[in-house]
Amino acid sequence: MHQVSRRSFLTWTAAGTLALVVTDPVTGVRRVVAEELPGGTLPAGDIRPFASPLLVPPTMPRTRRSGAKGGPVDHYDISVRQFAQQMLPKEHPATTVWGYGPADGGVGRRLHHAPSMTIEAAHGVPVRIRWVNDLVDDQGRALPHLLPVDPTLHWANPDLRPGPGPDGVPRTDVRPDFSGLTYVPPGEPVDPDTQYSTYQGPVPMVVHLHGAMGMGDESDGYPEAWYLPDAWDLGEHAEHGTWYEFFARRSLQRYGEMWRRGEQVAHYPNDNRDSTLWFHDHTLGITRLNVYAGPAGFYLLRGGPHGEDEVTDARTGRRAVLPANAPVSARGRGRVPTYELPLAIQDRSFNADGSLFYPDTRAFFDGYEGPYVPDSPIHPVWNPEFFGNTLIVNGRTWPFHEVEQRRYRLRLLNGCGSRFLILDLSGIPGVRAHQIGNDGGFLPAPHDLAQDGLRLLMAPAERADVILDLTDVPVGEHVITNLGPDEPYGGGEPGVDFDPADPTTTGRVMQLRVVPATGRDRTTPAEHLQLPGLPADGTAVRTRKLALLEHMHAVDDHEVEEGEAPAAALLGVMRPHEGKGLEAHPLTWADPVTENPDVGDTEEWEIYNLTADAHPVHVHETPFQVLERREITVEEAEYVTDVGGPLPVPPGDRGLKDTVISYPGTMTRIRMTFRNPGQFVWHCHVLEHEDNEMMRPYRVGPEQKGQPADGMPHH
């Protein structure tokens, strides 16, 4: 959705000029100063960088381990709760957020954090989690959302507003009907007979373990399987979504697990490769808001035939030694050296009272002030993208971390909603870095990031496993920076094809305070790592041609390019067109399933990006290989008239993936095998896009008996 960049629009409208020009009084050199990225009432420049220590997430405590006919099962009871957390430096107020933690009372309440403690899982040992929506106050009343909820999207809709159509029947999981009503901004009185505003009711949630493979669809966090908290004041609100009861019955049949009010139970077999996974909310139409409020966490899956134990030292053929966290006794007095660092990088904006800022009006994005739904397809609150004006790592703004002159293993996650990151290590003298893994586990071989200028591109939801070698880095303070843009990313080079992030704010990630090593580093240098091979690949039985699209709405008296404003992001299919090659056919979430492989099928998906921006495409349940990219010729934003030759696959995209960047004007081909029957989804992981139609269901195998019908949400 890159009609006009947020930065250029604001600097142009603020003073009728593109930027502020400053002249040095001594040299006379003129310099352009970009306007600070907008946010809440707390300017990013007023937040001290490197003032808070990095929090390394500890391990989530297991509730119990049970024995079963097929072996042990690890059980967790995990709730999401609301609490105050010191995200900003201590001179600022704490921030009210949501986060996951142990569901038991007492100590469990103090262990909730955003992001949460890390779940450590072993290959082949199933994990079963009771996920509890505990967004209630001390009196058991449902809490409202921390952020403004746009009720005009196709979303969970627990207040049962009527959906469009002649019957006028109230339903969940539909785009509500606001015919005859006008929008009123939040905080103003509303006449329900003639007006509507943001949704103020209890919060629906459902958890998705991003990267999990081989589980039943009841455990995948399907967007219409959401549920409200077990509060006593729900009133007329629907307690759960369209697919919830169907999946609850499946869970009872498969595992003997009853889903109680306000809960889901997920069973993860952990039969995919050793890899970095993460969990987050996936509720229809409000994923962007729920994730921004805080609930997310790492899930590290270890072992198996392609796991850490199979990594060898190419010099000796023996098992390699990767950086890991030492036992408590290693340093005495309870201190644990942390040589493996899970780092969740996210962007946020704040208000002066410490609260999270997220736009409550579409006008924040491009100045468009209406008319809104139902008088146009433009939604009153939804923003096509949002870029926070600070970066946080593991829940703290621009933290610092003391590190030794030795090797570390970084488990990196881009947890942003819209922001692409280009992590830059080139400002750290003497540093070396190798990427050894991505979303789906180990790469076929270590990739020396020096070949990329010590830069690492990460789209939202992508993970990277990196060996950071600080052996030759001088003692002192060094900064990991970010060159990704403060606007939608379309590919290219920072400083050439786009402006990098503001170097005083979003261009900083965290500070490393390097100290001498306390002992000998016995880990294997990354360049000598021999990584496990890939599993055998199947032969494709069919190729599908799919489309990434955007819906632009023509508006009058509006400053955006060509008088058009982004109204929605869409997926679709490409079909032959006589005379114009391929034609895009847009589809919405409610349209019937079009991707329906049989169990065991291997397919190739060609993803044609007809938009102006890059999109991270995520396919649930099955890993895939990135085969190639090709440039395409797009006409009239709906026809592909020519396809160029294959482009090389970057080293970081090799191996197995679950999220891939689809560049504008490019076809990306992926191959995957569908081994597990059920109803799943594929979507763009720019969360603002996902929440407004850039997500589609897909089904492996036949429809299941009793499942809700495609495209016909039920109450």
Image: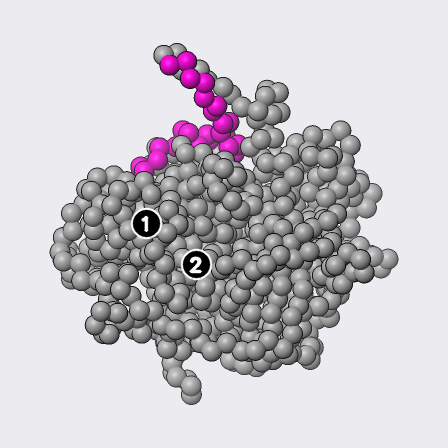
Q: What amino acid is at disc 1?
A: Leu
Quadrant housing the C terminus: bottom right
Q: Residue 699 in the image: x percent, y percent?
A: 65, 72
| Residue 37 belongs to magenta span | yes
Quadrant housing the N terminus: top right
Front-most of residues 359 and 558: 558
Counting residues from the start of the chain, the first of labels 1 and 2 encountered is: 1
Vertical position of residue 440 compared to residue 116: above or below:
below
Numbered circle sitting on residue 304: none
| Mark 2 crowd level (few <14, some 14–19, many ≥20, 10 Å Cα) | many
Name the element at disc 2: helix
| Residue 270 belongs to magenta span | no
Q: Residue 351 in the image: x percent, y percent?
A: 48, 34
| Mark 1 crowd level (few <14, some 14–19, many ≥20, 10 Å Cα) | some
Task: Determine whether, in the image, residue 387 is placed left or right of residue 405.
Answer: right
Residue at image coords 22%, 45%: 473
Q: Does residue 352 appear in the picture of this structure?
A: no
Residue at image coords 48%, 23%: 32
What residue is shown with label 1? 55
Front-most of residues 536 and 462: 536
Residue at image coords 72%, 44%: 552
**Does the magenta stretch mainly form a helix, a strand or a loop?**
loop
Q: Which residues are magenta?
A: 27-51
Residue at image coords 18%, 45%: 515
Q: CA distance from mark 1 to mark 2?
A: 27 Å
Front-most of residues 507 and 60: 507
Q: Residue furthest right?
A: 166
What residue is shown with label 2? 652
